[in-house]
Amino acid sequence: MAHRNLSILVAAWFIGTAFHISTLAAGEVVYGKAGSRDLKGYLAVPDGTQRAPAIILIHEWWGLNDDIRSKADQFAKEGYVALAVDLYGGRSTTRPSEARRLAGEVRQNMDKAFDNLKAAVAFLKAHPRVDSERLASIGWCFGGGWSYQMAKNNLGVKASVIYYGFFNPRDDLSKMRAEILGHFAEKDRAIRVDNVREFQAKLKTLGGHHEIYIYPNTTHGFASRPGENPNYVEEAAKQAWERTLAFLKKYL
């Protein structure tokens, strides 16, 4: 994973050095501040010198891990500047009990999480390779809920992709200006299909172009962490990915 260690290249670029890349550049980046603490994420930038649309990736309750970094790389290869944010301050886990605790900490201080995401938006809007009018968010599970919050609260994204993320179909969406794409599992025990259909019906009453898909015979997490997640379903994950790319191409 040598491309993840190009911190010198990335740092030189961010301080204004003229540099033309010929391969995907990726590595750790500071995208803002939380008091005296740096907000560190993972940035992947596509080949070329032209401005490109950008995506904020928001991790699952496991934290910013290699699965999310690899997704950022995939988006960069598709031509997007991809910033994977970190709402856990550098912590990640593979233990459900620890993940539940970390996610709970974020929910107890949502203003801090919103400030983190606003910093990510500001960072990308100022980035020399980003077309500042073409920003999207995407998240999985815990992160899917935060991608929804970015759209609901009009935090500067034109499109929001939600993979089995939490929402409230009764929310006031009058501030929302983003297009919504939602991927949900038919047999998800945490997010009921009836609620997804209620959400889908509400989106149809709003302006814009929104797409909600329910994947048969899948459960929560069907598109995450292939090779280690027993709920991963390759066919559904591939279909969701193709729909995501088509949606972003259309609305960014």
Image: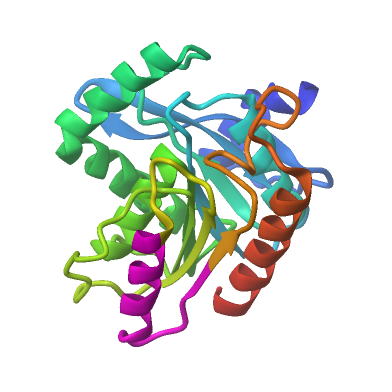
Q: Is residue 79 visible?
A: no
> Residue 109's spot in the image, x, y percent?
16, 31
Magenta stretch: give its range.
Answer: 194-212
Is 199 or 186 nearer to us in this picture? 186
> Residue 28's spot in the image, x, y percent?
56, 27
At a point 38% along the width and 12% down the height, the residue shown is 98
Q: How is the image coloured?
A: rainbow
At a point 48% along the width and 61% down the height, the residue shown is 136
**Magenta-drawn stretch contains 100:** no
> Residue 54's spot in the image, x, y percent?
55, 58
Judge whether 238 appears above or below 29 on screen.
below
> Residue 239's spot in the image, x, y percent?
73, 59
Judged from this view, the residue extending furthest toward the right is 22
**Magenta-drawn stretch contains 208:** yes
Image quadrant containing the C terminus: bottom right
At a point 62% along the width and 42% down the height, the residue shown is 222
Is 60 or 170 nearer to us in this picture? 170
Q: Is residue 37 visible?
A: yes
Residue 204 quadrant: bottom left
Relative to 230, 146 lies left or right: left
At a point 15% along the width and 29% down the height, the residue shown is 108
Question: How many numbered circles does the render carry?
Answer: 0
Image quadrant containing the N terminus: top right
